[in-house]
Amino acid sequence: MYQRRVQITGGGTYFVTLPKEWATEMGVGQGTVLNLVPTYSGGLLLFSPAVRERNRSRIDMEGKTPVQLLRDIIAHYVAGYEVIEITGKRIRSEERRTIREIAQSLVGLEILGETQSVVTLGCVADVRDFPVDATIRRIYGITQAMWADALQAFTSRDEELAQDVIERDGDVDRLVLLVARQFGLLLRDFLLEEEIGRSRQELWHYQSVSDQLERVADHAAKVCRAALALVSPPTTAFSERLRSMAQISWEVISEAIRAFEERNPAQANTLLEKKGLAEEVLPWVQAAAREQPENALSLSIAVDSVLRIREHGFNIAETAIDISVLRGSAVPEGKFQE
């Protein structure tokens, strides 16, 4: 941290000097235009135009498996880097194919250039074109549809529908990583706070909600994998009770999302008072397992997932309380409800 004393010119203008080593490193000289950005906390940030130009990273892929390379690229993507160079002694065609598939799995990531030893990826998606409010609504909508179809696939033992739900989980993952990237980019580029109209604290809470919805979607996929393992369709009595439980759990998620959207702590607190009121299901599940022992594992997995998504709804309600206390946190336009 540098410290400078404020000085005043004869005309009453306030000024401070810049640290020479910082100015040299950032290419600041006579006539350079600097950006001064007031922050929500009351601070004043000073930026050189060169800051954004330095937003590049490099990954050495030597010795990495495809899975390790995937993790590295995702980590750099989430960190908010605009350009990611992947280097190797000689990148083979199958490795290029792997890099291309990874890039296609992330929103806005494209191959900008290739040589024998370098593949350059660039994020061409402008964060301003993907408002986080709209992204969360999209995640919510996909997750809601996944759960409706997951219950149908499980109770009717519909393998084709179950596979479709499992594939849609990837769509949720892509959008959740996009929200994570927006947060990471905001941490790297403070100018974006003003440009997108959201503070870093707000984005942190949005990321928290997206993570909870991702887990809800994961449970829908888990129920569908359990559906694929069914030996016979569940009984009508079991299916009806499972649907009833799922409706109660989804109402928790729906109310929590509404409280988050409206920045309504009273609604969130009312919802959280229901947290310890879950019904006792163990005897019922045990009875169902005895009636259909060939389906015992799948039945217990489905019930467990239905109960767990309720807890994720309560977590969203707590986040609704947290974001409601932020100054300047505007209620977004539109509704999450479909």
Image (cartoon, rainbow, N blue to C red):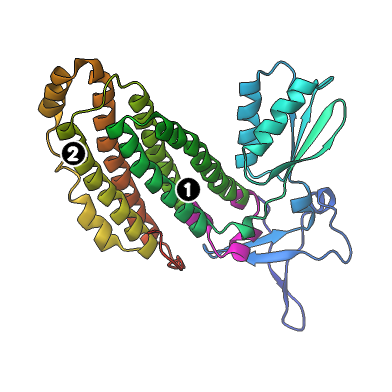
Residue 99, numbered label:
none
Q: Nearer the viewer, residue 132 or 156?
A: 156
Earlier sequence position, callout 2 versus callout 1: 1
Say how many tags the image has. 2
Compared across the picture, whether 74 is left or right of 203 comes to: right
Element carrying mark 2: helix
* Residue type, mark 1 in image: Gln
Compared across the picture, whether 57 is left or right of 139 comes to: right
* Highlighted magenta segment, given as a residue range: 186-204
Q: Which residue is mark 2?
A: 240
Determine if the magenta segment contains residue 137: no
Element carrying mark 1: helix
Real-space Cα distance between discs 2 and 1? 34 Å
Residue 207, numbered label:
1
Mark 1 crowdedness (10 Å alpha carbons): few <14, some 14-19, many ≥20: many
Determine if the magenta segment contains residue 197: yes
